[in-house]
Amino acid sequence: MEIHSNIPLKNFTTMKLGGNARFMTEVRTPEEVVEAYHSAKAQSLPVFVLGGGSNVIAKDEGFNGLIIHMRIPGFSVIADDLNSTTIQIGAGEDWDSVVKRTVDMRLSGIEAMSAIPGTAGAAPVQNIGAYGQEIADTLESLVAYDTQTDSFVTLLNENCEFSYRQSIFRSSQVGRYIIVSITLKLSKNLPQPPFYEALQAYFDQRDVHIFTVDTVRNAVIDIRANKLPDPKLLPNAGSFFKNAIIEDWQIADLKNANPDMPTYDMGDGRFKIPAGWLIEQTGLKGKVLHGMRVNDKNALVLINESATGYQDLAAARDEIISAVRDKFKIQLEQEPLEV
Ligand code: EPU
């Protein structure tokens, strides 16, 4: 295991800003994870696990510890029955390559999450989701190194406490587990309409009535390409804010004041309000704040055009949060993690 020092985090995060990490190492096996973790602890250094860096923002002061760059490969069928196939995937695999392979195998369950940047191991951390699917729907279990007990553990879906863009890995147990593989149970049945609104509209416009995992994947890739900036060309971290979650007692007043406001019933007495819509109403869509552009196709995404560092991003973020709070009394939350 090679440990490198003084690594610019801007080269490892798709937002392309922030300072340097003191140390970084690539891990390709679960054993290397343990080795890396032990070596950091021997020097009393904190550890941060980095996948594709597409949902991580680096601070200007950098990271005074060891970045474990997750590169563990793996894709193996571990069970198969009449209706489903179960696949174990290494945490370092590129998420979209995994989706492509499962689609090529005619398996359904993650095809609507096509073209999401990042790694398989990062997917459960924020419970990635798009176009009506989230990883919590198909994740059977995962294997993680438990830094508290110094052993590998299998966590079942219910142990991860998934909810909208949330899990124990970014709430109650931050830093405790290092995910080394995930196990997905995918269906052999064809995807069924009705689909998520934007996807269904795409099919309706094109008169598509026969749905395969391929048609769903291709549609999602097309929709995303038109709406979401490619991080390879325009530095960004996908949705920069979580959609707002509102309790039912607040919704009537908001709806009265804003009859056009889109709302999604979460079925548990709460409603989701698209943060992109809220930001658009403040007039900030398409504007540049401190070198960060509020994407003109989807106000939820911030593009780093000329920010000089994290400070600029934080200033832009805080202005957007204040503008939404002033207009709607709704507090937006940042979606990407910070190192
Ligand atoms: N909207 C606006 N203005 C905007 C953006 C959106 O009015 O600037 C409205 C849309 O018209 C629509 C609603 O907001 O009525 C929802 O928009 P959309 O379906 O595009 O989804 P989103 O809420 O913007 C979420 C996820 C995306 C995911 C899409 C599709 C979050 C934080 N974001 O975005 O995930 O791809 O749904 O399912 O939940 C990501 O997490 O990085 C990400 C891109």
Image (tube, rainbow, N blue to C red):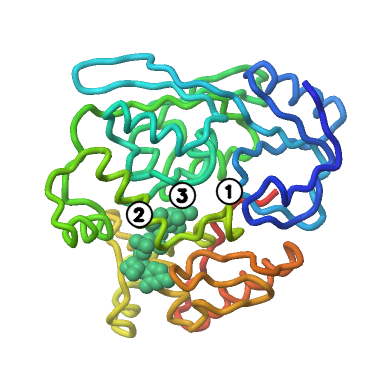
Label 1–label 3 contact, CB within 8 A:
no
Q: At 77% across and 37% down in the image, what residue appears? A: 46
Tell me which label, 2 or 1, sits earlier in the chain. Answer: 1
Question: Considering only vertical position in the picture, is 38 above or below 319?
Answer: above
Tag 1 secondary structure: loop
Asked if one can make out residue 232 in the rendered structure from this viewpoint, the answer is yes
Give the residue number, with chain letter if any, for mark 2.
222
The x, y position of residue 317, in whole percent, is 61, 69
Secondary structure category for the residue under label 2: helix
Picture residue at 57% right of the left edge, 49% below the top: 55
As measured in the structure, the alpha-carbon distance from the residue carrying label 1 to the one carrying label 3 is 14 Å
Callout 3: 10 Å neighbours few (<14), some, many (20+)?
Answer: many
Ligand 1 picture quarter: bottom left
Q: Is residue 303 left or right of residue 266?
A: right
Q: Looking at the image, is mark 3 or mark 2 nearer the viewer?
A: 2
Q: Where does residue 62 sit, x and y in percent of width and height? A: 80, 50
Residue at 34 percent across and 33 percent down: it is: 138
Question: Residue 272, can we see it?
Answer: no
Under 8 Å from ligand 1: the CB of mark 2? no
Q: What is the distance, in whole Å, between disc 3 and disc 2 at their CAs?
A: 23 Å
